[in-house]
Image: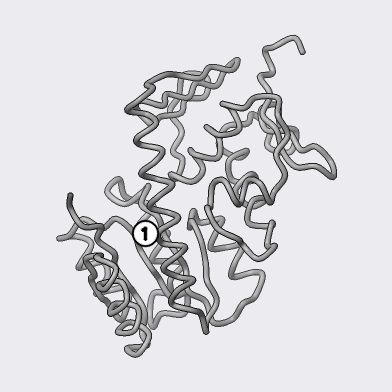
Amino acid sequence: MLKKRILIVDDEPSIVELVSYNLKKEGYDVLKAYDAEKALDIIKEEEIDLFIIDVMLPGMDGFELVRTLRGGDKNRDKPVIFLTAKGEEFDRVLGLELGADDYITKPFSVRELLARIKAIFRRTDQALTKVEEKPKKIAAKDLDIDLEKYEVKVRGKSVGLTPLEFDLLRFLAENSGKVFSRDVLLDTLWGYDYYGDTRTVDVHIRRLRTKIEEDASNPKYILTVRGKGYKFKDPGSED
């Protein structure tokens, strides 16, 4: 089995070396860059399975680097973990809005970072396994979810989802009608204790709605159940 390859992009050599050392101990293949320009050079030549990107990079910042990644087909769906020293709500929300899977605030525990990386790979690997074992489709009015092709179409037109957005939609659609709290969604899809920051779920739900709903402010598929959480509903059903 091929090693998972991770690219670390941070302008602090001590952090890069610390993270690199521990990732290699865990069996990952690690590439390093100290700015976005070098990262883009690496990306042109190498296949990356997961990115760890510092928000405050010199020159092109981490947000702009992720925008560039998401703009191409090669890395559009690859998981991203942001590193941020600010801990400001704006940074966190913007990062998630750009399609990052996770963020972690400096200073951080290497053990926690490793746990989050493992959770992301476990989630993505399990999703692929489920698709291989039970290829199927989920249809709801104008929405089609192809679990074998990992593809979503709205009114016949393909929409681009990140792996986490796809898994979130799949999980809710497979359990249509059931209400899931933010904590349960975090535990199920992120795979670890997110320290109560349930706003992460809200951001991903909002992004998902902008992609699949005709009117994101008046959703028909992913509904908010006040005080409880979220549920999926087929607007074409009669319940």
Residue at horizontal 70 percent and vertical 25 percent from the top: 177
Residue at horizontal 48 percent and vertical 56 percent from the top: 101
Amino acid on which disc 1 is placed: Thr
Query: Tag 1, which secondary structure?
Result: helix
Neighbourhood count class around disc 1 (C-alpha, 10 Å): few under 14, some 14–19, many 20 upward: few
In the image, 178: left or right of 160?
right
Residue at horizontal 38 percent and vertical 66 percent from the top: 65
In the image, 185: left or right of 18?
right
Q: Is 115 placed above or below 203 here?
A: below
User: Which is more toward the observer, 201 or 143?
Assistant: 201
In the image, 88: left or right of 155?
right
Q: Is 86 placed above or below 79 here?
A: below
In the image, 238: left or right of 135?
right
Number of numbered tags placed on the structure image? 1
Residue 90 found in image quarter: bottom right
Residue at horizontal 36 percent and vertical 59 percent from the top: 68
User: Which is more toward the observer, 156 or 173?
Assistant: 173
The residue carrying mark 1 is: 68
> Where residue 80 sits: x, y (%)?
42, 60
> Where residue 140 sits: x, y (%)?
59, 17
Q: Is 171 placed above or below 66 here?
A: above
